[in-house]
Image (spheres, grey):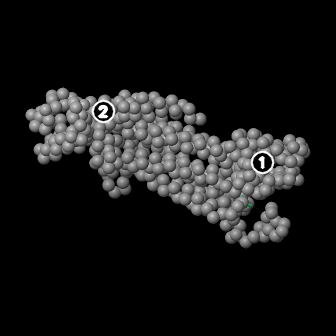
Amino acid sequence: MAKMWAGRTEGKTDKIADDFNSSIKFDCRMYRQDITGSIAHAKMLASTGILTSEDFSLIESGLKGILADIESGALQFDMQAEDVHMFVEAELTKRIGDAGKRLHTSRSRNDQVALDIRLYLRDQVDEILGLIKCVMKAVVDKAEEYADAIAPGYTHLQRAQPISFGHQLMAYAMMLKRDVGRLCDASFRMNGECPLGSCALAGTTYNIDRNFTAKELDFTGLSENSIDGVSDRDFCLEIMSALSILMMHLSRFSEELILWSSWEFKFIEISDAFTTGSSIMPQKKNPDMAELIRGKTGRVYGNLMALLTTLKGLPLAYNKDMQEDKEAVFDSIDTVKMCLQVLAPMVATMKVNAKNTYTAAQKGFINATDLADYLVKKGMPFRSAYKIVGTIVGDCVAKNIVLDEYPLEDYKKYSELFDEDLYSEISLETCVNKRISVGGASPESVRKQVKDVREFIDTIL
Ligand code: ARG
């Protein structure tokens, strides 16, 4: 097919080459950003006298008409077009004639695409922030609801110390809080450098006003080197890195939801709306959604690695390899959005079985540290207390009882410091309620975390 860039060559390329080269099937999703960018560019050209105001009016109304027609479905993308930029420009020229051909003055698809992705990612990051906010709300509400539920906290997946179940949930809220920060940072940096006016790679001889377009498009500054402006995609990588870390958190959380909903734990029940049955085993209730979040984390990491690898050997400035940025970043965005959308209601509707978390906390000697601390508070050095308690735990294991059931006379054989009050000191309630150090596992601390994170959530967007 003959190309808009036909000139030096006849522009007749092989059909297979056309399909291989074309990006419209995936970059068509940036049509709105492409049109917004073109209107800003044309407005700047008119303001500097490079374009007449008549041509600008034609271009502006033409582009707005194209936008409206795409949105209403009246205009379909031409899948034969090379990319969304070519499609919009060709359609404009079809509609308004020569004025349409003037739009590309002092611009290149290289700065155009560098702009479009930034504008697209800006909107998508905002959407993702809104979705993280929903997950955070669900997590925080659940944590508050189960602030008083006692559960075992784990290290090495071995019962370690008693905690409020809400405390464990709030750990995820804190991770998400940092994910929000990372995405905001990346977006802030990206929005600080408008690439428009970098043109093909070397800027332009026209007297353009780059600050005008930057302002028009809500950038806080300009890219300061035209080669860099068109050739780096580090902003995509930053966002994809932030999304990868976010997915790592969602995956860890999902892993726990899967474990907790197993018969071995039975700490939670995921609502029927977010589980599936088995086609053969009638008793099954499978946590597929959580598993898929965990599974999809791999592709978000993969997309990041793919783009890092694509970029690593590219000479400056633009190379067609860079067209590969889009499918990778779009897939990461789509995947993350779906995962967040499913996770929020899944958390909001899950039930915690506080009886089971309590029973689990009663086993595994998770109050052993507290028993050692009891001796320490009565003056014994920690290491000595640790040794004594370890021996007592061994004796309890042999007798198949827990520390709370070990008789006082037996305790006294190890130290005269043991007294009747030890039993209340090592009760699960005491162990949890007393963990009031800042960020500790007590219900009181959980309620404070809930309050702080709620205040943070209100600042998002
Ligand atoms: N579709 C291209 C991309 O996504 C647009 C830029 C093309 N520029 C060029 N010089 N061929 O990267």
| 96 or 163: nearer the viewer | 163
- At label 1, counting other C-alpha atoms closer than 10 Å, the crowd grade (few under 14, some 14-19, many 20 or more) is many
- Regarding residue 77, the answer to whether it shows in the image is no
Q: Residue at x 51, y 41 (%)?
A: 178
110 relative position to 184: left or right: right
Q: Quadrant of ligand 1?
A: bottom right
285 relative position to 45: left or right: left
Res. 424 mark? none
Q: Quadrant of the C terminus?
A: top right
Nearer the camera: disc 2 or disc 1? 2
Residue 296 image offset from top left, x and y in percent = 48, 54
Res. 38 mark? 1
- Which element type, helix, strand or loop, lies under badge 1? helix
Q: Is mark 2 within 8 Å of ligand 1?
A: no
Q: Residue at x 16, y 44 (%)?
A: 391
- Which amino acid is tagged 2? Val
Q: Residue at x 68, y 46 (%)?
A: 119
Q: Residue at x 48, y 33 (%)?
A: 453
- Which amino acid is tagged 1? Ser
Q: Which residue is mark 2?
A: 432
| 121 or 311: nearer the viewer | 311
Q: Is mark 1 within 8 Å of ligand 1?
A: no
